Image: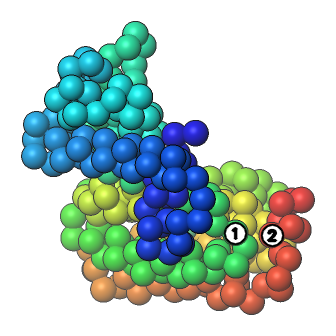
Amino acid sequence: MALDPLPASRYADSARPPLRAPARRARTSVTDDAITRIREMILTGELAPGEKLPPESELAAKLGLSRTSLREAVRALTLLGVIDTRQGDASYITNLGPELLLGALGLAMDLQREDSMADLVGVRRILEPAAAAMAAPRITDDELQRLHMLVRPQLSAKQVQEHVELDWEFHHSIARASGNELLVALLDGLTAPTMRMRIWRGLTVPGALERTISEHNAIIAALEAHDAELAHAAATVHVAGVETWVRSLAPGWSTLAARG
Ligand SMILES: [Zn+2]
């Protein structure tokens, strides 16, 4: 598949001796070249975001590549969200927005397993307070009102899934209010793989939902006061609670969590 050439070739040269299949290595490096050339065209502005790619034969000739290698490169870049192959046979450069990060990062994050979860939450513990601190001076009344609506103590403790979805929306909204779309994409990527874990936490940790609600209110109060330092502290306390919990779990917990 087209995903294969990227990681395989990137790591093969440095990490592994060339043990097998010279033909395959050659083909992979031709695809790598094709990707590099297209990347250069994007970086130099020769291909702009949203622009239609030249016809395959023209581009292949220009880059000195076979149509097969070009096609493989286009397929790989499509999977990474750099190229959008629309109906018909035209391909376009995407808008290359921060959501690009989600494609690559999201896949890598989704494949993270139980023993990486604590580190994943640990990274959130660095970024989430930073996002809250950035949001504090600039958050609008509308955004604050939305945050209030996302804290719903009236939901029953049994509606764990709803609580976790609101929690996701709450943190996503704060990240948006930070004004840094790349930070939003990073945090979304870090949060998505922890959803199941957090549903399980809601089901098994007594008082977890109430605690979340009161910590969310503390974050809102700090944002309302436009106090960046306080917002940073409140978000740290909140995410650190989850991190401490996940670090305390016995190996094998994810199997239990998967069963719900
Ligand atoms: Zn939360």
Residue in the image at 37% along x and 44% along y: 30
- Vertical position of residue 56 compared to residue 144: above or below: above
Residue, disc 2: 254
Disc 1 C-beta below 8 A from ligand 1: no
Callout 2 amino acid = Ser
Is disc 1 placed on a helix, strand or loop? Answer: loop
Q: Mark 1 Cα within 10 Å, few/some/many (few <14, many 20+)?
A: few
Q: Which label was assigned to residue 240?
A: none
Q: Where's residue 111, x and y in %?
A: 64, 60
Disc 2 C-beta below 8 A from ligand 1: no
The one nearer the camera, 252 or 126, is 252
Which quadrant would residue 121 be assigned to in this image?
bottom right
Q: Which label was assigned to residue 113?
A: 1
Q: What is the C-alpha distance between the residues marked 1 and 2?
A: 8 Å
For residue 198, say whether it is visible: yes
Quarter in which the C terminus is drawn? bottom right
- Determine whether, in the image, residue 92 is placed left or right of residue 173: left
Q: Where's residue 225, x and y in %?
A: 29, 75
Q: Where's residue 24, x and y in %?
A: 53, 47
Q: Mark 2 Cα within 10 Å, few/some/many (few <14, many 20+)?
A: some
For residue 155, say whether it is visible: no
Q: Where's residue 62, x and y in %?
A: 17, 29
- Vertical position of residue 161 compared to residue 109: above or below: above
Residue in the image at 46% along x and 58% along y: 9
Is disc 2 placed on a helix, strand or loop? Answer: helix
Callout 1 amino acid = Arg
Q: Earlier in the sequence, mark 1 or mark 2?
A: 1
User: In the rendered structure, are the residues bearing label 1 and label 2 in contact, judged by CB atoms less than 8 Å apart?
Assistant: yes
Residue in the image at 78% along x and 62% along y: 157
Which quadrant would residue 245 be assigned to in this image?
bottom right
Color style of the picture: rainbow
